[in-house]
Image (cartoon, rainbow, N blue to C red):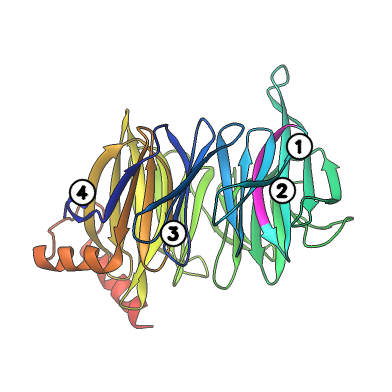
Amino acid sequence: MDLKTATWMVRNLDQPVSMVHLTAEHDVFAGGWDGQLTHWDSEGTHRWTTPTNDRISAIALNDTSVAVASGLHVVVLSRSSGEVVWSVALEGSADEVAWWQGDLVAVSSVYDIEHNDFIESAVWRFSSTGDLRWVERMDERPWTLVAADDRLLAGLGRPRCGHLDVSSSPPFAHTKPPTSSPTTCGTSGRTQGLFGQTDGTVVNHQGEVLSTEEGAVEHLTCMVKGYVATTDDGLVVGRTETGERCWSSKGGTVSAQTEAMEHDGASLFWLARDEGVSSIVNVWATNQGGKLATGSFAKVNAMHGTNERTVLGCEDGSVLVWDRVMFHRRQNSIGPTEDTDERTTALQAKLRALRRS
């Protein structure tokens, strides 16, 4: 199935999209490279647009507010109106934001061009009204924030590597890595948090090695019954929750991936591969081993999914949304495809066995 024929909504941000976020209520938030943040409701109606300081690199929402990392600043806006509630400049670039126990946790880093490396980073915690509770500066860059076991964890680069428990005020408990490689990415799952490392190691939030991939891990996505790890050279590997390899796909560089649209006790896996100035997006039913849809779009910069919808943000400003009911209705009307380029009969049998387990 051609993905373009099943699109539920198409909007435009009027600048390259850098981040997208879907809420449980199906609202869409999209941030741009020039700092614009736009909100569309569940029906696709434009609610508001607000300019912020610079490129939006992270979006986090609570019941009343939306927080963004915008250049050097953390900016908190009203979800209902888009009005800026408070804003604060960090030391270096604002990299990540997360709401935690009613507060906002942010990560910043300072990059030194001469050294070609990050020379200082910090973890910040603000009250919901913008008051600074504490800041902890460190040599390592916290590359990702992961929630697991009622804890908020920060995956570290060199020299310490591993991860820190930043759930409460410092000093932070440090979990040493199983290897000396720095963390590159992370994700929060239903039963565990995962961290990917430059040596290909995938580690859970308890510090246990689940798998070792053939290259630096750049993307991680938790699925209903496992996870998908993607390396810097375009190798995508699907594994069970304990790390057993189920399937793999090799191709161009992956720019974004997400889990979305739960169906028949599983969920779909969406993957965008770069092809010059465009991207090819493929959708798999990982519990069956089959590719359901594919489509070509302007270069995909960001992707996010929920049980009901998927949203893509593209370099040409396009914001595209798919709805689960419409997607499966269209897919069922077309029928199964004969795609066999990225799977084998044995693989399909193995995945069907996993589905029944």
Residue 67 relative to residue 44: left or right: right
Q: Nearer the viewer, residue 52 or 254?
A: 52
Q: Residue 25 location, x and y as percent?
A: 45, 67
**SS label for mark 4:** helix
Residue type at mark 4? Lys
3 vs 4, front mark: 3
- Marks 1 and 2 sit apart, C-alpha to C-alpha, by 9 Å
- Marks 2 and 4 sit apart, C-alpha to C-alpha, by 36 Å
Q: Residue furthest bottom?
A: 357
The residue carrying mark 4 is 4
Q: Are marks 1 and 2 in contact (CB under 8 Å)?
A: yes
The residue carrying mark 1 is 90
Kindly report the secondary structure that dominates the magenta region of the rendered protein: strand
- Marks 1 and 3 sit apart, C-alpha to C-alpha, by 29 Å
- Marks 4 and 1 sit apart, C-alpha to C-alpha, by 40 Å
Q: Are marks 3 and 2 in contact (CB under 8 Å)?
A: no
Q: Is residue 204 visible?
A: yes
The residue carrying mark 3 is 27
Whether 242 is drawn above or below 218: the answer is below
- Does residue 12 show up magenta in the picture? no
Q: Residue furthest right?
A: 171
Q: Earlier in the sequence, mark 1 or mark 2?
A: 1
In the picture, residue 152 is in which quadrant? bottom right
Residue 234 relative to residue 329: left or right: right
Residue stretch in magenta? 92-98
Q: Residue 11 location, x and y as percent?
A: 33, 44
Image disc number at residue 106: 2
Q: Around disc 1, counting alpha carbons within 10 Å, would you say few (fewer than 14), some (14 to 19), or many (20 or more)? A: many
